[in-house]
Image: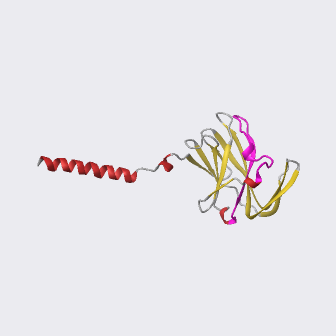
């Protein structure tokens, strides 16, 4: 009889342990940044920065000047130009941006638009000083509507905050947009 009690305790413990293992979150979902969803036109505040989506433009081609040469880039998709205003709250920092499309896929900044004037990848944001920047993405046209701009701190994104900024109204697609210094 004592054996039955011991076996029952071991089986109950194994069932509880199995249930805990099945319902425990995996590593990738545990170390995600804390999401803050921000409505269009509003300022979102993360732990170490605050930001606001100020404008959105769409273009088939972009043109800019780099190292004294005029460059024109075209795309089979569309160039999405996100204009933001941000400031750091704790210390000087850089921001990273991705576009989360309507399907849930994420698009990184376009490497083909590096070194554009006011480009996000070259901006440092300071506490108490608001600064404007431009993030350029290259993506399929059907990923624009229903998408969001996701901003994180460059070096502390894992346990920090991520702002999911809803875009302002979608503009008409233009044939070319030129970035001036």
List x then y, in percent, for residue 173: 77, 64
Side (left or right) of 78 relative to 179: left
In the picture shown, does residue 152 fall above or below 112? above
**Is residue 130 shown in magenta?**
yes
In this view, which residue lies farthest toward the left?
Answer: 1
User: Tell me, what colour scheme is on the image?
Assistant: secondary structure
Side (left or right) of 1 relative to 80: left
Residue under the image location 75 percent in, 46 percent down: 133
Query: What's the magenta region?
Result: 113-141
List x then y, in percent, for residue 65: 85, 51
Residue under the image location 69 percent in, 39 percent down: 87
In the picture shown, does residue 56 fall above or below 96? below
Residue under the image location 66 percent in, 63 percent down: 143
**Is residue 64 shown in magenta?**
no
Find residue 22 and report its image quarter.
bottom left
Residue under the image location 56 percent in, 43 percent down: 158
List x then y, in percent, for residue 179: 83, 52
List x then y, in percent, for residue 4: 15, 50
In the picture shown, does residue 129 fall above or below 11? above
């Amino acid at each position: 009889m004592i054996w039955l009690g011991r076996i029952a305790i071991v089986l109950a413990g194994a069932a509880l342990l199995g249930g805990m293992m099945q319902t425990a979150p995996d590593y990738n979902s545990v170390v995600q940044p804390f999401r803050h969803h921000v409505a269009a036109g509003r300022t979102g505040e993360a732990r170490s920065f605050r930001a606001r989506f100020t404008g959105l433009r769409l273009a088939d081609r972009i043109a800019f000047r780099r190292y004294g040469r005029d460059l024109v880039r075209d795309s089979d998709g569309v160039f999405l130009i996100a204009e933001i205003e941000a400031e750091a709250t704790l210390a000087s920092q850089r921001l990273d941006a991705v576009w989360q499309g309507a399907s849930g896929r994420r698009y990184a900044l376009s490497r083909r638009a590096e070194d554009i004037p006011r480009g996000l990848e070259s901006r440092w944001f300071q506490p108490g000083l608001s600064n404007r920047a431009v993030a350029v993405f290259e993506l399929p046209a059907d990923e624009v509507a229903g998408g969001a701009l996701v901003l994180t701190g460059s070096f502390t994104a894992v346990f920090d905050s991520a702002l999911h900024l809803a875009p302002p109204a979608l503009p008409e697609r233009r044939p070319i947009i030129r970035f001036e210094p």
